[in-house]
Structure formats: structure tokens, C-alpha cells
Image (cartoon, coloured by chain):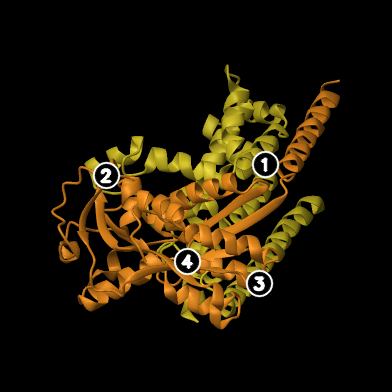
Chain colours: A orange, B yellow
Amino acid sequence: MKRVLIVGLVVVLALVGTFSMNEAKAADQELLVSAAASLTNAFQDVGQKFAGANAGVKFVPNFAASGALLQQIEKGAPVDVFASADQKTMDQANEKKLILPETRKNFVSNSMVLIVPAGSKMPIKGPQDLLAKEVTKVALGNPDSVPAGRYTQESLKNEGLWEKLSPKFIPGDNVRQVLDYVSRGEVDAGFVFATDAATAKDKVQVVATLTKHQPILYPVAVVAGTQKKDLAQRFIAFVLSKEGQEILAKYGFGKP
Amino acid sequence: MSKSLIPLLLTLKVAGFATLAAFLIGVAFAFLLARVRFPGREWADALLTLPLVMPPTVMGYYLIVVFGRKGWIGQWLYETLGVTLMFTWQGAVLASTVVSLPLVFKAARSAFEGVDPNLERAARTLGFSEAGVFFRVSLPLAWRGIMAGTMLAFARAMGEFGATLMVAGNLPGKTQTLSLAVYEAVQAGNDQLAMILVLITSLVCMVILVSSGRILKIKYLKEVDR
């Protein structure tokens, strides 16, 4: 009897899962947008407003490091729009013919900052101070796949600090992981976008802004393999519109 | 070559230490639960088995809450001894130990329960101390089951990913084990390196499986001969 009950319970749970999944898929049209991790909060908001203004459209965001998103698209992920946090990743996508180049637009700018956990007692006022002996762990995006890491690398190299600081580096999979490491106090300092730091104001403290890197401009483009080119273009137009730009500005992003 | 050799050596080191720790803790608790009756025994069993059924990320989160720099134990460790397990290979060992512990524990408990208590009683009447009974009667009789569980624990520790990533991070040369190195290579689009790492991992796992099977079989045949 007991065994029958357990088996029955498992079957019921599986069925509930299956049916509720189908219900979620009932929306007419899904727009899958792969966006850089730093856009997480802002694009959730933008997507909601976009779906609200277009009946029957479901906005499905996919956030990760830009480099990881590029790999997913290259391996055939059914993505409609790609927004990266740097030009290099979008250039690579263009070289591999993964995006429609005529749809590519820069839509926001950003800056890199050095942050420490709120209430940190370390005397860190700028990148130079990270050389101090008591600073042992500095988090940054992995430059191989994370744009925030590339900007950090470029800036620190130009300041002559990259080699000296590298034993202290804790590489993160995306910029939000770096933010998480700093806000939990697991590392002494970290490099994130100014907009990331703004989402965790009570947990981290901005101590300096990096300057010695290329300007940070986020590009967006329609993915070449999309079946929904019109909808994807409408989404990009919305991001560039006054309303879209206002939402992005609310999260601290600058004009392109 | 070093790009794949370093993660391999690190993986073997982490899995080795984790298996040793899981073996000692798992066998001790298994014997306790198999031989001593106390209230909440089955709850203790469930607690020790939990890492097997829970997602590794959940275990990783628990470990961060307990052992992180601001965690319950982690803060004490950091303030009194100045050490932190986060982003260290010892942290990776901790994560792997927790997820592989149930495999040793479960196997060892049923192995101990399969040992006839009369043999232990007989040993006692012959003047063995409690430690003598354990090391010369119970443990040798349960050995095959324990070894099988330990082999599985080693395999599980080799492939650990989720909890390790959360606790130890992904630091090349320090905490980047094979599974993490594969993940990073794929993320960065380095398919060639990913392929090399995947082949090495598969090869090592095959060697471990075949040799462990052989060790267990020899042991078994010897027992049959007797």
C-alpha cells in the first residue's frame, strides 16, 4: 500500500510539472534575448515594458557573460537578439556571421569601478592600494569571456599593475559573480561596472573609477538565425526609443 | 600540455583528500548508526544522505553560509586563525567531501548491518577489546562493501562541479579542477582545449573503473577460495 502511494505521488508530481510547463508555453510569440550579465535588472524591466506594449509577445531573457552568450549562439541556441557588454564580443559574432550587421546599434555606455565590501577596514582608495600586503583577494571578471574583466585588464595593464596584482586575482564567470563575491565579503575588493555596484548599494562601496580603458559601449543586434526578425528589430527600436533609454538611465546606464 | 596536466593533478589531489575524509567520517557514522540504537537515528541517516539527493548548488550555498568569511564557522576561523576556506583547494576538498560522503556512508552502513552480531559477540567472549572487535572482526567483514562505496565516492569527487564552483571558485592552477577547466574552456570558446580535457577525464575515469573492478574481483576470488 505504502509503495503504491509513493509511486502515485511521483507520477502526480511529474504530471503537474508537465502540464504547468505547457501552460507557460501557450504564449503566442517568444522573443529570446541573450544579454550581458550586467544588464540583468535593466533588461528585465525593459522586457516587461516591451511585452506590456506588444500583446501576445513573451519576453524571455538569458543573462550570462557576453563571451558565454556568444558561444551559445555559435553552437546554435535559438536566440533572437544579442546584447553584449563590449565591442570585441560583438565583432567576433560579426566575423562568424552570427548577427545581421545592419541591425547592430550601440545603446548604452557604462564605466568600470573598484568596489570594496561595505564597512571594509582596508585602506583601499584606488587600484594602486591593492598592492598592499593585507589585500589578498581581488575579484574580477575572467578576461577570456567576461567584458568587465577585459576592461579591467586593459586599465590595469596601462597602469602597470596587472602583472603585480595577478597572484591576488579571483576570476568570476560573469560580472555579477564578482559583485556577489564582494558583497558577501569573501574578497577584499573587486572590479565591476558602475551599474552593477548601484544594484548593491547597501553591501558594497565604490572607491574609484577606472579610466585607462577604451570607452565602454554596449552593442545590440539581431541574431542571424532568428525566425522573428521583425519582432527582434522592434525590440531593438524600443531599447533605443526615449522610453527604453529612460528605463536604462534609471539603472545608471549612460547614453551611447 | 601544462594547461591540462595541472587541472588533472589538482583533481586527483582534491578527490584523494576528499575520499580519505569521506571514508573516515562515513565509516565512523555508519558503524555508529548500524550498531547503536538512539532516538532520531533514521533522521541522522537522512541528514548524512541528503547531499546525495540535493542539488550540489544547494550544498554549495550551505557551505558558503557556514564556512564563508562571514559564515558561522568561517568567521571564527578567519578571526582566530586567519584562514579562510573560500577560493582554496582545501575548500574544494570540503565541497567534494560533503557530496561524496553519502556514498561511503550508505554502503558502509549496509555492510556493517550485514555482519553477523554473533561473530562480534564471540570475539568479545574470547577477550577482544571493543576496538579489537571493530578492527579485527567488524571492519574486515564489511570491507568489500566499504571499498565499493569508497570507489564510488572517489568517482563522485573527481566529477564534482557545482558545490566546488561556489565554494572554491574557478582559479586556474589553484582550484580549477578538470570539470571546471572544461567549463571554462567551453565558455571561452576554446574547443580544442575542451576536447583535450574531456579526453583526459574520460581516460582517467576508465583507468580508475577498470583497476578498481580488478582490485575488488581479486579480493572476492580470494575469499571464495577460502
Question: What residue type is disc 1 on?
Answer: Ala
Measured from the top left, where is residue A159 in percent x and y? 20, 75
Q: Is residue B19 visible?
A: no
Q: Which residue is mark 1?
A: B107
Left or right, residue B20 beside residue B52: left
Estimate the x, y position of residue B61 in percent, counting from the top left. Answer: 47, 42
Q: Which residue is mark 3?
A: B203
Residue B47 placement, left or right of B171: right
Determine if marks 1 and 4 fall on one subunit.
no
Under mark 4, the amino acid is Ser
Element class at badge 3? helix
Front residue of this view, candidates B85 and B185: B185
Question: CB under 8 Å between callouts 2 and 4?
Answer: no
Q: Which mark lies nearer to you, 2 or 3? A: 2
- Judged left or right of residue B87, residue A127 is left
Which quadrant would residue B189 be assigned to in this image?
A: bottom right
Real-space Cα distance between discs 4 and 3?
Answer: 37 Å
Which dot marks residue A84?
A: 4
In the rendered image, the quadrant that contains the C terminus of chain A is bottom left
- The residue at the point 69 percent across, 27 percent down is B117
Q: CA distance from mark 2 to mark 1?
A: 35 Å
Between A35 and A175, the one nearer to me in the picture? A35
Q: Residue tagged by mark 2? A: B78
Q: Nearer the viewer, mark 2 or mark 4?
A: 4
Q: Dot 4: what SS?
A: loop
Evaluate if marks 1 and 4 touch, with contact meaning CB atoms under 8 Å apart.
no
> Which is in the foreground here, disc 2 or disc 1?
2
Q: Earlier in the sequence, mark 2 or mark 1?
A: 2
